[in-house]
Image (spheres, coloured by chain):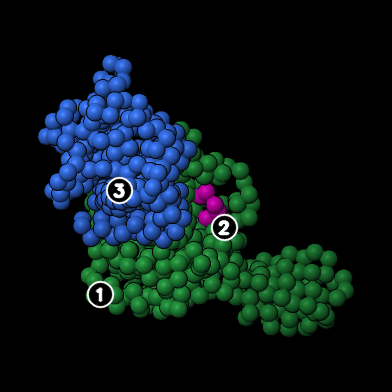
Chain colours: A blue, B green
Amino acid sequence: MLRETWALTARELKHWYRVKVQIFMTLIQPIVWLGLFGQAFNIGVLLPSQTVPMFFSGAPDYFSFMAIGMLAVNALFTCMFSGMSIVWDRRFGFLNKLKVAPIPRGAVPISRILATVIRSTIQVSIVLAIALAFQYIPGLTGLTLKEGFGIVDLAGMFAVLFLLSTAFASLFTTIALAVENQETLFGVINLLNLPLMFASAALFPTAMMPDWLRAVADYNPLTWAADAMRQFAFIDPNPIHSLTADILGLLAVAVLLMGASVVVSRKLLSNR
Amino acid sequence: MTAIVEVKNLTKRFSEDVLAVDNVSFTVEEGEVFGFLGPNGAGKSTTINMLTTLLKPTSGKAIVAGFDLARQQDEVRKVIGLVPQDLTVDDELSGRENMYLQADLYNVDRDRAKRDIEDLLRVVNLEEAADRRVKTYSGGMRKRLELAEGLIHHPRILFLDEPTLGLDIQTRVAIWDYIKDLKAKHNITVFLTTHYLEEADGLCDRIAIIDRGKIVALDTPAALKRSVGGDVVDLIVDGTADFSGTIRQVDGILDVRREDGAYRIKAVKGEASIPKVLQAVSGQGGNVTSVSLSRPSLDQAFLEYTGRSMRDAEQSGGFDRAAAARASKRRR
């Protein structure tokens, strides 16, 4: 079970890091998002400065608030393509090779999920480093963490990201197993992607949203992740949920979706 | 000899009007090279896909290496190797990496895998290219890599779906030699499908001729050809005299037909009959200007059993429906 899963995970990662353009994109995309979006929409300046941390989960400015949310969004963006390789493998016959091999069917989705989580962790680390580095560039706002931010807080943030990535990677891998066709998969990804991102606390405080939207956003896993990470990163005066609730929610979704991917693979990857 | 594959009444129906494999029964003996010969769309690949656990039979039963295909799929998977028709090696990995991945998928002991991989790469002549990405390989190299991959776990049965499709003649001959070697050195049972007559003829111990999802004949290549009738001798004699009667009286002649000065003679053994025929015709004053011998081919056998030649069968429209149904199923 472990050997073939790891072998397939390693294959995924090789596909990723051997394409140089992808590494480049990985670096450029967050710079663009943080640089343009984060700086341009610095809505914190519209508020009286002493009220900013209250609105933005304890962050000293909007950029810091948004940069943490951006980590979660970046995880989502990495995960949404995690099933793409299954579609390609189906097309080029590699999936048949896996179907003929005496491996548990679940190894197929789990290897993709694992590879995506590893990628996501690497990419998010880069985004975090860039957001912090902005502090030292004149004219830019950078990510300012709470005083006394320590290794435990950092580990907590990555644990949250791990759960979030597992959940989303499982979701999109399961969808890819089921749709079998690239165009449909793109359609579904687009359909889910933007609502997930905007109906969440990732880029914008839910407190400022209309009630109906807020009701949805508060139960978006992306919100849980952003909310939990902000409680590690800042001293949050009024978090949306408690840290425990956020983490348990993410854990439940991750376990549930990963289980679903295994169940679906058993059904769809055996002979029909 | 013991049976290693036993198939009974195997049927695959893709849809109401697409019956890809129709109630097929046969046995493959351990250690033989068994061939499915038929035109595209005859049901060859569908049969292989069922026997390798990729497709679920609509009905019927198959025992592969003693395991029931319906209930013991994982056991079946462990003892078979499949070299599919489409190339499935990973382009982004090197040849060697592909081999190691395959070894991991089949949980081959690591030390043994290391040794075998080097051996196999040498056998298929990919040693030098082993560390290059597969996307730089030619079609023949990919196929050879695919063959090597199919053997990494020492399968008892190797399934080859159109092993030389689209390859140049040199590569094709190399692959034939390799398959013969497998049988000679490792006693691996080989089950292959092909629509190349010379491939079936030269490689297989026994051939099943399959057409429209049914097995229409199953025997050794020699017996199949024999069943068509004997050799054919073509003879041209000067002048207008008719020597048909003379020729018919020669030993071992089955049939004579005359058109103008040309005679088409069917004989049990062509090469033995030629001198006798020549002697008889000369003895009656005939002047033979040309003689040629042709042996019965599998194509003639195919014609005999299906009522059409391979080429006609390839072109007939009915088969594309099965292929189209498969493709649409894949897309779903």
- The kind of residue on which mark 1 rests is Arg
Which residue corresponds to the image point at 66% horizontal and 72% vertical from the top-left? B294
- The kind of residue on which mark 3 rests is Leu
C-alpha distance separating marks 3 and 2: 75 Å
Judge whether B103 appears above or below B62 on screen.
Answer: below
Quadrant where the C terminus of chain B lies?
A: top left
Which residue range is magenta in the image?
B38-42
Which residue corresponds to the image point at 51% horizontal and 71% vertical from the top-left? B202
**Residue B74 location, x and y as percent?**
24, 54
Residue at which label 2 appears: B302
Is A232 placed left or right of A19 in the picture? left
Quarter of the image where one finds residue A178: top left
Q: Is residue B280 magenta?
A: no
**Residue B100 location, x and y as percent?**
32, 67
Residues beneath discs 1 and 3 located on the same chain: no
Residue at which label 3 appears: A132
